Image: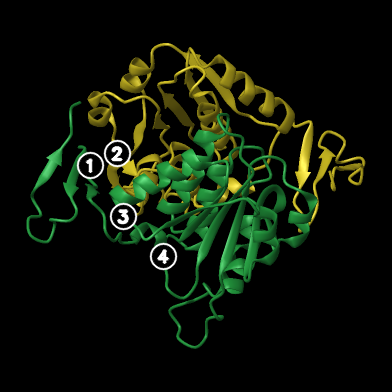
Chain colours: A green, B yellow
Amino acid sequence: MNDAREVVVLRYGHRPGRDDRMTTHVGLTARALGADRLILPDNAGQSAETVRDITGRFGGPFAVELRGDQKAVVKNFEGVVVHLTMYGERVQDVEAEVREAVGLDEPEVIGEASPPRDLLVVVGGEKVPWALYERADFNVGVTNQPHSEVAGLAVFLDRLFEGAELDREWENADRRVVPEATGKTVVDAEGESDDGDAGENTGRD
Amino acid sequence: MNDAREVVVLRYGHRPGRDDRMTTHVGLTARALGADRLILPDNAGQSAETVRDITGRFGGPFAVELRGDQKAVVKNFEGVVVHLTMYGERVQDVEAEVREAVGLDEPEVIGEASPPRDLLVVVGGEKVPWALYERADFNVGVTNQPHSEVAGLAVFLDRLFEGAELDREWENADRRVVPEATGKTVVDAEGESDDGDAGENTGRD
């Protein structure tokens, strides 16, 4: 979402079949809420395809990678590592510290913000190894209640970017949804500058 | 979460088998992020059981209902209806209006906040009927991008309550997770007042 730093979401572990939809939702949430890149286990090819397909239609940039060496990716990541877990510190207590660590603190004051650093957000799937808790710069709990890795990722990203991700503009999209009070309108994004009214209203179906 | 108003999450549509985990995650997210009650379609009994089980162990209050008449529930709801959809108005544009509609605006100023009203948050599963778009007081998009109903619900609730849901206290819990920088500690919630250190540290597994 920003040239200065890369925010990467890594899904740790995936059971083909059983986890397909959850992993796909993790990936689509990462894309929609401001991450720049997604790393999935190499057995999650179907989820990767779905996320790439959505990116092709609704825009990017957003990269999707399949990697077999997730432990190594986490261990060797050059930047800040956040691990989302219900056992972690409360997001409301550490979010400012995370923003400062990656240079997202007061970015509007030139010269006063911390330097930008890349951020890896690890979302657990299968049971994660203890080494991940130790490697993480921050173990963060979006509540300390059992709920959903998708929900945890969504709230974390929204708080990380302080809502700025919602105003993101998308490049190379084929289509764009027009937000409206009552309706389902999708327009051709490529032709927008020439013909903004060329809407395909899919309502009442 | 609050005696003055009830926030209810309704999952619209459910395909047994295929949707089990997504519906369960919708329910657990509703509970963890401040809703008071969950309404599931009557064919989602397995998800209802899981959410009730978590509530029994980690606390409440949080009610779970199975209903066969979802259309009627939405139509006859006495309060404000929000429908989460990627075609809706941008959450950042309407969230203040939603809060005002249910009396969550500036609640700290006695006498100045709007009166509390109940809120029904509808989360689409299967394709929702057009009538729902028309019945909803607000059709709200957490981004106008395709991603996850779980992520949309999570961000919506976090913004609705402005983070207050993260400080919620749980009643009648058997156990409680202790937030910490590196660890996996669960304590007996019932015995906490007598013996706060009786922790069951489950780390390194």
- Which label number is shown at residue B7? none
Instruction: Determine if marks 4 and 3 fall on one subunit.
Output: yes
- Which label number is shown at residue B139? 2
Q: Disc 4 marks which residue?
A: A1
Labels 4 and 2 touching (C-beta < 8 A): no
Q: Name the secondary structure under disc 3.
A: loop
- Which label number is shown at residue A181? 1
Q: How many labels does the image show?
A: 4
Which tag, 1 or 3, sits closer to the chain's start?
A: 3
Mark 4: give few (<14), some (14-19) or many (20+) Cα within 10 Å. many
| Residue A172 pos. (x, y %) | 26, 59
What is the CA distance from the residue labelled 4 to the residue labelled 3? 12 Å
Marks 4 and 3: which is nearer the front?
3
Amino acid type at mark 4: Met
Q: Disc 3 marks which residue?
A: A59
Q: Mark 4 lies on which chain?
A: A
Amino acid type at mark 1: Ala
Amino acid type at mark 3: Gly
Q: Which chain carries label 2?
A: B
Q: In this view of the protein, can residue A73 be seen by the observer?
A: yes
